[in-house]
Image (tube, coloured by chain):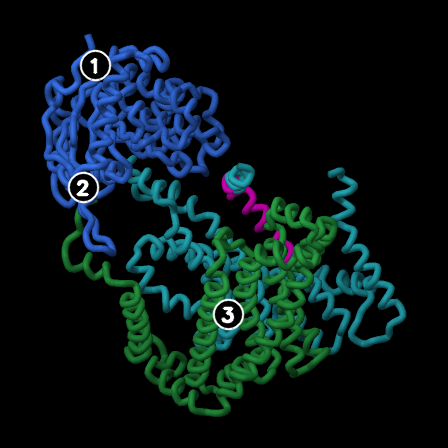
Chain colours: A cyan, B green, C blue
Amino acid sequence: MSVLKRLGYLLGLPLLLIAIWYVLTIDSDSFFVVDPVTLAQTFVDTWVGERFWNDVAPSLVRLAVGLFFAIGLGIGLGLLIGSFRWLRSMTEPVLEFLRAIPPPVLVPILMILVGINDQMKVLVIISGSIWPVLLNTVEGVRSVDDVLLDTGRVYRITGWLRITRLVLPAASPQIMAGIRQALSIGLILMVISEMFASSSGLGFTIVQFQRAFAVPEMWSGVAVLGLIGLALAFIFQFVERRVLRWYHGLREVDHAG
Amino acid sequence: MARRGGRASRLTQLPSGVLGLAGVLAFLLVWEAIPRLGLADPEYLPPASEVLQIFFRNLGLTSFWEAVGHTMLGWALGLAIASTAAVVLGLVIGSSSFLRQATHSTIEFLRPIPSVALIPLAVLLFGVSLRSTLLLVVYASFWQVLIQMLYGVADVDTVADNTARSYGLGRLARIRYVVWPTAMPYLMTGLRLGAAVALILAVTSELVIGVPGLGHEIALAQSGGATTAMYALVLATGLIGVAINMGMRLVERRVLAWHPSVRGEVHA
Amino acid sequence: MPAETVRTTPVGSGEALLSVRGLKKVYASDHGSVEAVRDLTFDLRDGELACLVGPSGCGKTTLLKCISGLLEPTSGEVRLAGEPVTGPPKGMAVVFQEYGRSLFPWMTVQDNIELPLKNARLGAKERRELTQRSLHEVGLEHAGKRFPWQLSGGMQQRVAIARAIAYQPRVLLMDEPFAAVDAQTRADLEDLIRKVWQDLGVTILFVTHDIDESVYLGERVLMLSNSPTVVQEDLPIDLPAERDQLATRSMPRFTELRGHVYEQIQKAKKAAPQGNPTESTAEVAPIG
C-alpha cells in the first residue's frame, strides 16, 4: 500500500470526526461541550508548565513505581507458583478471589491500612496490577511445551539458565498479555486513588475542575488521560514487538503453512 | 529424576480440589491470626471470623440485597448495551476491508483512554444516577467486545466464505452461516472480558460518584469507620466477581461445546 | 579435539556402554494399569549403531524415555558406562521426532546449539568451535544466525542433530526422528546419520517404525514385540559398511533382511510376546 494511502487510512476518519465535532460545536452554547479550538488552547494553558510538574509528573512516577513492582512481583511469584502443580492448585481459589475484587475497591481498604499518602497510592496500583501479570505468568509457566521441557532435562539444563532461557521465554507471550492488562489497570487505579483520596495529582486536579464546573479544563484533563493511555499503549507495543519478535515470526510461519 | 521421599510427595499428589480447599483454609487461618496476634491493628484489619460474621449477617438484610441489585442492574444493562453495539459494529466493520482499515487508527486511539477519565463528565451530565454508571460501563465493555468481534470476523475462512458466495448466499445469509459461527468463540471471550470490566466500572461508579450499590456501601462503611462491615462488603463484591467469571466460563463452555476449539484466546 | 565426556569405567570393545536389564514400565490409566513395557533386555556396545523397530504402540517412546532418564521405570535397570541411570545422565543426548517443539524458537540456531554447552560451563571460544564444527558436519554452516522456524523441517532436524553432536555425548538416542519429514529429506538425513556416526564414532540407538530405514541404517536391528513389549529378536545386519540409498537398497541381502524383519513385525502384531530371545543368526541364511 502506498504511503499516501496508508496516511489516508490513518488520518481519514479521525480528521473527519474532528471536523464534525468542530461544526457541531461552533454555534453551540451548550454548557457541556467544548469546541476543538478552545480545547486545544485550554489544554496548553492548563497543562503545559507548572501544573505538569506539580501534578502530572508525580502521578506518572507513582504509576511507574507501582507497575515496576507489580510486574516484578507478578512474574516472580508467577514463576514460583506455576512451577509446582500442588502450589498452583492450592493457591488457585484464593488468587481467583483476590483478582475478582474490583481493583478500585482496594482504595478504601488501603486507605484504612496505610493511610492517605504516596505509599498508599503506589500500593493501590501494585495490588490491582499484579493480578493479570501473576495469573498470566502462572498459566504461561504451566503450559510450556512438554517436548521443550524434556529437551531441557535431557541436556541437563537446570537452575538459573533454565528459568531465563527456557521457562521465561516460553511463557513470555502470556506474560506480555498480562502486562498489557496490568498497564490499563494501573492507570485506572492511579486516577481513582487520586480522585478519591488525595490533595494533589492528576485525578485530583480533574475532579477539582469538575467540581468547579470548569468544563473546558475538565475536558482537557480527559484529553491528558487519553494521551497517557495512548503513550502507555505505544510504549508497550514497542517493547512487545521487540521482546516477542521471535513469537510473531513463528506465528507468521505457522499461519502461512 | 530422583524419587523424593514419602509423605511430602504424597501430600502434593492430592487432587486439586482438595488442595484448593486447603489453600482457602490456610488463607482464612492466616487472616484470622494476623490481627489476633497483633501483627496488624485489629481495628484496621479485623480477623476473618468477625468479617465472616458480618458477611453472613448481611445475607439476611434487604438493604444488602438492594445494593447488590443496583450493582447488578448497572452491570447487566451496561454489558447488554455495550455488547449489542459491539456485535453490530463488529460485524459491519469487520466485513468490509475498507471500513476496517479506515477505523483502525481511531479505534486504536480511543481504546486506551481509561474509562475513569469519563467520571467527571458523567458527574456533570448525569450526576448520581444509573446513567452515570451506564456511561462508564458501556464505554469500557464496548471496547472489549468490539475488539474480539473484529478478531473473530477477521478469522473467517475465506474459502468457506467464497464457497457460500458461489452458492448465491446473500450478505445476511453469509453472516448467519459463515461469519457468525466463526466469530462466536471470540464473542464469548469478549463477553467474558467485558463482563469482568463491567463489574469493575459499575463498582467504581458507585464508589467514586456515589451511585447506589455495593461500591457506595463500601465507601460509606469506610468513611463511617465501620471497618469490619467494609471488609464484609469487599468480600461479597469479590465473590460476585468470582461468580461472574465462573458463570461466564460455564456459558462459554456450554455454548461452544460443539465448536471445534480452533481458536486460542486472543489478547485483548 | 577429543571430547571430555563422562567416563567412569573404561569401555573396551567387548563391554556394553549402554545396558538395559529387565526394563518394565507400567502406567496407571482409567482402565486399570497398562503394562507398556514388560521386560526389555539388551546391550549397546561402544560405537554401535543399533536400530529399534516395532509395531505402532509397542512402547518405543516409553522405552526411550526410560533409557534417557526422562521416565522412571517401574522395575529393571538402565546403565550408562556402568553407572545406573536415575535421571537424564551426562553424556546422553536425545533427538526428538517433533523438531519444531524441541528447538527453542526464541534463540538462533547457533544459540540453540550452544545452550547445552553453556550449561556444561564450556568457554565461549570452545563453544563457538564446537558449534561451528557440528553445523559443518550437518551441512548447515551458514544457518547459524537464523531462527529455527525460518528453516525447513529437514533443516530443523539437522539443527537438532547438530545440537546433539556438539554436546559430544557418549550415546545418542533418536526417537523416530525422521517420521515427520518427507521421504526425500528422510533419505538425506539417514545418510547424514551414517556419516555422523562414522566421522565421530558416537554410539547411536535409533528408534523407528520404518523397517527399511532400520535395516539401511543399523549394524543391528532389535525387533520389539507388541505391547507389553519385549525384545523379540536381535538381528545383526551384515550389509557392507559403505551404504548408499540406491545401491544398498537394491541388494538382494537387503531385501532378505528387510523381509525377515517385516515378517517378524507382522508376527509381533498378531501374536502374544515371546520371552527374551538370544541373538538370532541362524534364521536368515544368505541366498546362494
Quadrant assignment for the C terminus of chain B: bottom right
Find residue C237 and report its horizontal and vertical position in percent: 21, 17
Q: Secondary structure at mark 2?
A: loop
Q: Is residue A161 above or below residue A204?
A: above
Q: Is residue A239 magenta?
A: yes
* Residue topped by disc 1: C238
Could you tell me which residue is drawn at 44 percent across and 30 percent down? Answer: C153
Q: Residue at x 43, y 22 (%)?
A: C184
Span highlighted in magenta in the image = A227-247
Q: Nearer the viewer, residue A210 or A55?
A: A210
Given the image, what chain letter belongs to the residue carrying mark 3?
A
Q: Categorize mark 2 by other alpha carbons within 10 Å: few (<14), some (14-19), many (20+).
A: many
Q: Is residue C125 visible?
A: no
Residue kind at label 1, given as amino acid type: Asp
Residue C165, compared with residue A153, is above or below; it is above
Name the foreground residue: A170 vs C49. Answer: C49
Q: Which residue corresponds to mark 2?
A: C228
Q: Are marks 1 and 3 on the same chain?
A: no
Residue A140 or residue C227, whichever sits in front? C227
Which numbered circle lies on residue C227?
none
Residue with the mark numbered 3: A103
- Please tell me how many numbered marks the rendered image carries: 3
Whole-percent x, y for residue A161 in the image = 35, 40
Residue located farthest toward the top when viewing the structure as drawn: C288
Q: Main secondary structure of the magenta part?
A: helix
Q: Is residue C89 left or right of residue A161?
A: left
Q: Do callouts 2 and 3 point to residues on the same chain?
A: no
The quadrant where residue C103 appears: top left
Q: Secondary structure at mark 1?
A: loop
Quadrant of the rendered image containing residue A74: bottom left
